[in-house]
Amino acid sequence: MAVVAFDDEDRVALVRQWRLPADAALLEIPAGGLDVADDGTKEDPDLAAPRELEEETGLRAGTWRKLGTFYTAPGFTDELMHLYLATDLTMVHADGRLAADEDEALILSWLPWREAVAAAESGVIRDAKSIVGLFWLARILDSRGR
Amino acid sequence: MAVVAFDDEDRVALVRQWRLPADAALLEIPAGGLDVADDGTKEDPDLAAPRELEEETGLRAGTWRKLGTFYTAPGFTDELMHLYLATDLTMVHADGRLAADEDEALILSWLPWREAVAAAESGVIRDAKSIVGLFWLARILDSRGR
């Protein structure tokens, strides 16, 4: 699943991480896989989303909204991406220190949402789920005249 | 690569095809892979896009614009999606018959662009490249006040 985390200062949370297939450090919205239980059952994405957001960014959200679910590349994989909008954000630690999974080694950065959308349009942000998430946020905010 | 084909009646061309990984027939924007030469060189996406559009829909475009390039799922594949906007469309055959690659067995349908975008938001259109393409088109048209 992937999370558009949008704060009260109209900024979006982004993480930069090394992506081996891309051979590059990509700037993306926070995202993660679903845990699979011993019996093969996949984790509920509604539960995975808050866990991953906190692991990757140290953030908790007071409000969650499911935006959509889509196939990343249906020609060759059944991977489904569950996309969420998370608002009313708070840092788990007041000092901004990450809570867990420090080995994920992600660097959190904040961009004003219009800049993040422009970064998607210009190719600076260049993975499908992040572009979908940022354009989706833009549609919501533009429709509110924000 | 993938193509947002937008006609003079403000409609978008969509194709429905069976996707084995999804175990479903998905409604998508026209798309295809890049041919790989014997020496491993990949086809130029700028050349592949018109070929695939014609193969899948029977359409030719008088005007091409590259919108962007993005990774579909950078966690596990290096697949890059090259996204184009194609306008000034004409059917290769006046009777609408497909020109080639009839074994691709795609069903072409046209949706007014606002309906196509709504279909992406509601989950009827549910693959990443199509959602990116339709939202991108919407950003262009909305900025023109269309």
Image (cartoon, coloured by chain):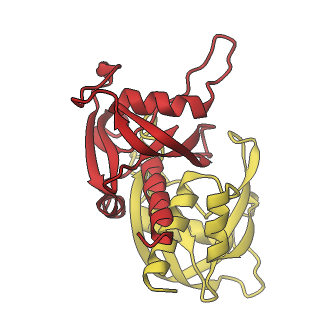
Chain colours: A red, B yellow
Which corner quadrant of the image does residue B104 belong to? bottom right
Q: Nearer the viewer, residue A102 or B67?
A: A102
Q: Residue at x 74, y 62 (%)?
A: B106
> From this viewpoint, which residue is outermost toward the top?
A38
Q: Nearer the viewer, residue B21 or A81?
A: A81
Tell me where residue A38 appears, x and y as whole percent.
64, 10
Q: Nearer the viewer, residue A61 or B82?
A: A61
Q: Residue at x 40, y 39 (%)?
A: A30
Q: Nearer the viewer, residue A145 or B73?
A: A145
Q: Residue at x 34, y 58 (%)?
A: A113
Tell me where residue A136 appears, x and y as whole percent.
50, 59
Tell me where residue A123 appears, x and y as whole percent.
32, 58
Relative to A62, say whether B131 is above or below: below
Tell me where residue A126 appears, x and y as whole percent.
37, 52
Q: Is residue A18 left or right of residue B114?
A: left
Q: Is residue B53 left or right of residue B72?
A: right
Q: How many numbered marks are there? A: 0
Relative to B141, say whether A37 is above or below: above
Q: Is residue B44 visible?
A: no
Q: Residue at x 50, y 60 (%)?
A: B132
Relative to B23, say whether A115 is above or below: below
Q: Is residue A30 visible?
A: yes
